[in-house]
């Protein structure tokens, strides 16, 4: 794996030094702003981009990460985020139970849940 653009881009190579996976890692705050199917990846709403990727995939989706990441098997595209709305709700419940509530933390986590942090595309069957 090689990193470029202040670690906002990673490229994985196979044993023959051929590119097998390219991943944009910077998220909404990064310096790179990839576009897929005409939509800006990191600036778009996470649910809207998921639906677009789902439509283009037209097949199996690996959703085993409970909303944190998805792998679109037919198109070899993967997306990841660090928070989900469900995880934030759990955090809010924990904070309230502990008698401490941090709105700034909640706002930051909501931003993370509403936007993808990474997107990658690989060779078929990567």
Image (cartoon, rainbow, N blue to C red):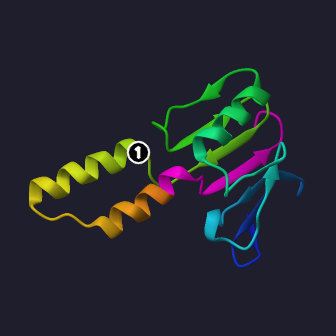
Q: Residue at x 18, y 53 (%)?
A: 94
Q: What residue did someone put label 1 on?
A: 85
State left or right for residue 44 relative to residue 16.
left
**Image height of 53 relative to 90, above or below:** above
Residue at 44% x, 46% y is 84
Q: Is any atom of residue 105 visible in this view?
A: yes
Image quarter where the C terminus lies is top right
Tell me, yes or no, whether the highlighted magenta stretch contains residue 6: no
Point out residue 107 in the picture as x, y percentages from the top left corner. Answer: 39, 62
Q: Nearer the viewer, residue 25 or 115?
A: 115
Residue in front for this viewpoint, 60 or 52:
52
| Placement of 15 over or under 5, stated as above or below | above
Taking the spot 64% from the left edge, 37% from the top edge, the residue there is 50
- Name which residue lies at 73% across and 50% down: 120
**Residue 16 picture location, percent across and down:** 89, 53
Q: Position of residue 21 (x, y in %)?
A: 78, 51
Q: Quadrant of the N terminus?
A: bottom right
Relative placement, left or right, of 101 versus 122 is left
Q: Quadrant of residue 100?
A: bottom left
Please tell me in which quadrant of the rendered image residue 52 appears. Answer: top right
Circle 1 packing at 10 Å, graded few (<14), some (14-19), many (20+), is: some
Vertical placement of residue 2 versus 24, above or below? below
Span of residues in magenta: 112-126
Residue at the outermost bottom position: 6
Q: Secondary structure at mark 1?
A: helix
Q: Is residue 13 visible?
A: no
Q: Is residue 122 magenta?
A: yes
Count of picture labels: 1
**Residue 95 location in percent, x, y?**
18, 58
């Amino acid at each position: 794996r090689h990193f470029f653009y202040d670690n906002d881009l990673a490229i994985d190579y196979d044993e023959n030094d051929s590119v097998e996976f390219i991943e944009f890692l910077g998220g909404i705050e990064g310096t790179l702003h990839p576009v897929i199917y005409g939509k800006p990846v990191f600036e778009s709403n996470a649910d809207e981009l998921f639906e677009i990727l789902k439509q283009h995939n037209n097949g199996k989706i690996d959703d085993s990460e409970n909303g944190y990441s998805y792998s679109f098997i037919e198109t070899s595209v993967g997306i990841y985020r660090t928070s989900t709305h469900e995880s934030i709700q759990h955090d809010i419940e924990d904070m309230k139970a502990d008698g401490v509530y941090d709105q700034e933390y909640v706002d930051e986590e909501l931003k993370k849940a509403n936007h993808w942090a990474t997107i990658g595309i690989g060779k078929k069957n990567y």
